[in-house]
Amino acid sequence: MPIGIFDSGYGGLTILKEIRERLPQYDYLYLGDNARAPYGARSFDIVYDFTLQAVKALFERGCHLVILACNTASAKALRSIQQNDLPQIDPSRRVLGVIRPTVEIIPQLTSTGHIGLLATRGTVASHSYALELEKSSPEMTITELPCPMWVPLVECNETDTPGADYFVEKYISELLGADPEIDTIVLGCTHYPLLLPNIRKFVPPHIRILPQGEIVAASLEDYLHRHPEIDAKCTKNGTTSFLTTESPDKFDPLAGIFLGSPVASTHISL
Ligand code: DGL
């Protein structure tokens, strides 16, 4: 059965891309809830409802393991789904997110212990990164900043413009102004890797910028090694299928840009 990868829309494709590079042998089923994206400014309850519907849809299509490749969904829905829903739906299935693997790697990377987080309003308001970091590394300081203009810039394919540079510089200088000791910046939103060339222009070279795709891919590989009973349920024919709640005509062209290879999706309703 395929590994399910869920995102509010296109952004999870940046995570899928890295996962497929690291683990090409598995089958994947990607679901983008594009008709209802973006999730970034939606309330806790709505993100939870939408995410649960998506997880159930992926379970119905055979997935035993689902990755929430969306920071907003990981921040607002993962814990409730793991603790309250999975035991009732099917305790043998697993749903994993992107926040914990990212936080786990931070202590290996920072020297100053000062971290910057750039994410959607929803992820920042949930303080999920700060709460996770507090549990594992309470001595560290994290400054969280929402970047509400970055997702629309990416979705409108405006990354290569002076307007994109303006909004990138605005948020980077706000973040570094708030804590000049930051030496590691986490890109806590699936869309932000597509702004990396812009971000690099405004971040001093001694500061590490951390996109999540590779981290999540490495963490998934490790998880499958540690859980052979889940690994055994994942088929390995190297295929990927795509589902979207939008029209495939709209989804496929932009999805191809995020993934870096052609996409042919099928519509579903949640
Ligand atoms: N995928 C979302 C995230 O990583 C960004 C897009 C959205 O707001 O839906 O937070």
Image (spheres, rainbow, N blue to C red):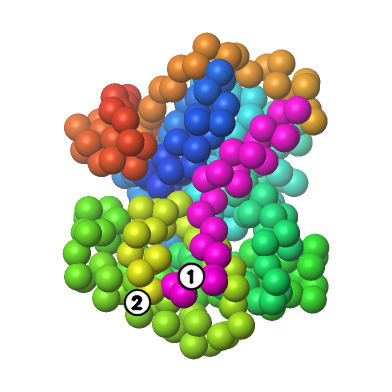
Q: Position of residue 124 (x, y in %)?
A: 54, 70
Helix, strand or loop at mark 2: helix
Q: Nearer the viewer, residue 29 or 217?
A: 217
| Disc 1: which residue | 205
Q: Residue at x 71, y 16 (%)?
A: 232
- Disc 1 Cβ-to-ligand 1 distance below 8 Å: no
Residue type, label 1 = Pro
Please say whether residue 133 is one of the residues in the magenta stretch. no
Say which label, 1 or 2, has the lower sequence index: 2
The x, y position of residue 69, in whole percent, is 52, 44
Decide: is 16 above or below 75. Answer: above
Q: Which residue does the image show at 46% across and 65% down from the upper left?
A: 120
Residue 52 image-quadrant placement: top right
Q: Which stretch appears magenta?
A: 203-225
- Distance between the alpha carbons at the discs numbered 1 and 2: 15 Å
Q: Quadrant of the C terminus?
A: top left
Farthest residue to the top: give it: 237
Q: Which mark is residue 169?
A: 2
Q: State the image coordinates of residue 85 (x, y, percent, origin top left).
A: 68, 41
How crowded pointer 2 is (Cα within 10 Å; few <14, some 14-19, many 20+) is rated as: some
The reply, left or right, for residue 110 in relation to residue 246 is right
Q: CB of mark 1 within 8 Å of CB of mark 2?
A: no
Q: How would you rate the neighbour count of disc 1 (Cα within 10 Å): few for under 14, some for 14-19, many for 20 or more?
A: few
Dividing the picture into quadrants, the one containing residue 181 is: bottom right
Query: Count of labels shown?
Result: 2
**Local SS, label 1:** loop
